[in-house]
Image (tube, helix red, strand yellow):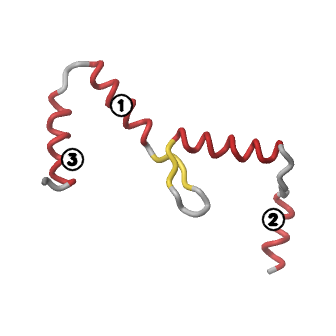
Amino acid sequence: METTSKRKIDLTKRLLEVQDKNVLDKIEAILTETEIVAYTTKGRPLTRRQYIEHIEGISQGVGEGATTYTSQEIKHSILKR
């Protein structure tokens, strides 16, 4: 079984030889889809799709009456400690 590093090097070499634009577009789409764009407050990485779902979930919670706080309320709470 080859190591992850060797596999990356082999894939990179193959990628440099690709001439077909459609293949490159597909590879780019896969990489974009799996790219980490944000982290949760607990440090969990999120892809673009997961981030959008995360934000939509928060928005839905607010729409359903979840408690929200203003910047001043948060600042006061932090400084009070």
Quick check: 41 left or right of 15?
right
Q: Give x and y (percent) for residue 17.
A: 15, 29
Q: Amino acid at mark 1?
A: Glu
According to the picture, the residue beneath numbered tag 1 turns out to be: 28
Q: Amino acid at mark 3?
A: Lys
- What is the distance, in whole Å, between disc 2 and disc 3 at their CAs? 45 Å
Closer mark to the observer between disc 2 and disc 3: 3
Whichever of callouts 1 and 3 sits on the residue coming sooner in the sequence is 3
Say which residue appears at 59% left-offset and 56% top-offset. Answer: 40
Q: Residue 8: which disc?
A: 3
Provide the secondary structure element on which disc 2 rests. helix
Point out the image quarter for the N terminus: bottom left
Q: Give x and y (percent) for residue 25.
A: 34, 24
- Looking at this view, is 30 or 77 the one in front? 30
Looking at the picture, does residue 29 appear above or below residue 77?
A: above
According to the picture, the residue beneath numbered tag 2 turns out to be: 74
Whichever of callouts 1 and 2 sits on the residue coming sooner in the sequence is 1
Q: Mark 2: few, some, or many residues within 10 Å (few <14, many ≥20)? A: few
Say which residue appears at 80% left-offset and 76% top-offset. Answer: 79
Looking at the picture, does residue 55 appear above or below residue 18?
A: below
Whichever of callouts 2 and 3 sits on the residue coming sooner in the sequence is 3
Q: Give x and y (percent) for residue 24.
A: 29, 25
